[in-house]
Amino acid sequence: MYFTLAISAATRHGCAALVRAAQGTDPRILPIPGPARVVWRAPDERTAVLRWGSPRSPGPAETPAAPDRDRAGPSHAGTIWVSPALTVLRARTGLARVDPVYLAETPGAVVVSDRACWAAAVTGRLEDHDPVMAGAFLSLGFPAGAATPFRGVRALAGDHSLRVTDGRLVITRADGRPAGASGTGVADALVAAVRPLGAAAPVELSLTGGKDSRLIAAALAAAGVPFRARTHGFASHPDVIIARMIAERLGLEHTVTEPRAAAPAQAPDRAEVLGRLRSAVLVSDGMLSAFENIGSWVGPDHETAVGPVQTGGHGGELLRGGYAQVAWRSPASRRPVGAAQAWSSAAAAELFRRLTTRRLLLLRPAAAAAYLASLAPWAATIGAGPLRALDDFYLVNRAGRWSAAARQAYLIRSPLVQPLFSDQVIRAARAVPLRLRMSDQLHRDVLASLRPELLELPLAEHPWQGQRPTADSVLTARPGPAAPPDWRRSQATTGFLREYVLDLGGTGQLFAIVSRRAAERALRPSHADPAAAWSLATLTALVSGDWLNGRQPRP
């Protein structure tokens, strides 16, 4: 795993100054060992590419191939490169932009990186925190639009390309290829997306009893890719039971790992909670809450223990209409078609409001106004077509920002391929009418095309949309061993998070963005919202700079 930062400047002196800043980057801001080194420099010394970390084989690339055969200094995901013959710095994002590109402009120069904090550090913006990102982080749980934690560093939009020559930037919409609007078209695209995995050994599928990992299993089998399956859970859980059925049908090696036995409830170790807060900012580029299980930074010896290429059903919601399916009411219900559509439109508008503004009162007025202004274009599209807008919002923000940050954290630990985020699959799926996606008809059509025998097997917990669950179609959880208590939600944990926010928040810039009085109300003992407490504490770790202690060994 490695990160890339590329510079294009109007003068060689400007480029040299930014290269020195990149080489002098504080190693505490990056979650893998450095230091930075120049891997390519233009003959005129106005363009340079630097790399932080060591290359390793990441498995087949998921991003579209760059248009130039001759590429210099490509990034880990192939999203940033230089065309050496023309001395042009280039970058491109996919439709879901799960491999992000970040952009920072300075007078006479442009910096492009796949790590926002590195671009911020090189351009002197590491301590200039963007209230728009904070607003999205507190309400949605992830950034929205182009905002990053650092003012002046923005995320390139999905399906866009950029060219930089001598510090002059041009951004264009990438040319999308048409896709067939049918389940067969999606099935073909999915098989094409997984076929390169045949060259990777070994391949391990995270298999559950749900709908999405089943699609990947069917595609891998249809493509003739050798793979094995792994499921986490107790033997009596529906995910384990059904995953075993799928593995038997496909003749797969299947491993089950059981959770640890429940331990007596006890107060969390404060040093462990503190380490989790710092590490979450470090590994997610400051864009995900420490409530999420996203792993931690790695030391210099990690590259010696690379495991199998991991794959799974991440991104399956894109084939179901994203947030739109949550708000959709099928006309097959007792309501007339027109009434069902009106209900769905109203539910979609209300869902958007709840998603985007549920913790708006935590923000100070100026920060709240800036955040709401960033949502104005989305609010307009919700008014024009609520369900379609929710589908788009999921692709642009939930996939393009949450999944992108989580993916970078996962890639630190092991190679990961997520076929449902590939451009060809998303294009083919979005060509299918939204109603067929929200009704799960697309999922069923793809399975019927690839491995119809998997349609006969039951689902875990949730039936196909529009179908009444029966004993043969859905398995629900039966009483089994008690799961370990979730210490993240305990009063002892939220009590520590409250102390952390109120003590450290006052020493940094947090309360210039967040209302201290509102934070005290949200964190009041015995009534605290655990998710809000973790979000506020993570934001505190970022804004105060405490995350720079994240590479300290855990106790």
Image (cartoon, grey):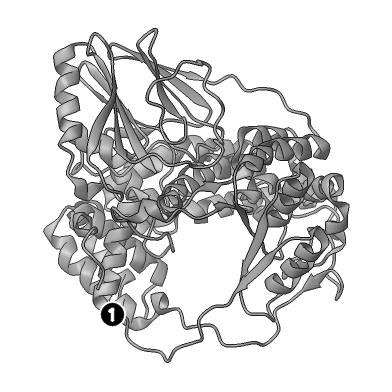
**Res. 151 visible in picture:** no
Q: Is residue 390 left or right of residue 471?
A: left
- Residue 87 position, x and y percent, is 35, 11
**Residue 277, above or below 319:** below
- Residue 510 position, x and y percent, is 21, 55
Q: Is residue 534 left or right of residue 212?
A: left
Front residue (pair 340, 158): 158
- Residue 541 position, x and y percent, is 24, 59
- The residue at the point 26 percent across, 38 percent down is 118
- The residue at the point 42 percent across, 42 percent down is 56
**Residue 442, above or below 518:** above
Q: What residue sits right under mark 1 in the picture?
A: 269
- The residue at the point 55 percent across, 42 percent down is 393
**Residue 389, above or below 516:** above
Residue 17 sits in quarter? top left
Q: Amino acid at mark 1?
A: Asp
**Res. 400 visible in picture:** yes
Residue 264 sits in quarter? bottom left
- The quadrant of the rendering that contains the C terminus is bottom left
- The quadrant of the rendering that contains the N terminus is top left
- Residue 270 position, x and y percent, is 25, 77
**Residue 186, above or below 211:** above
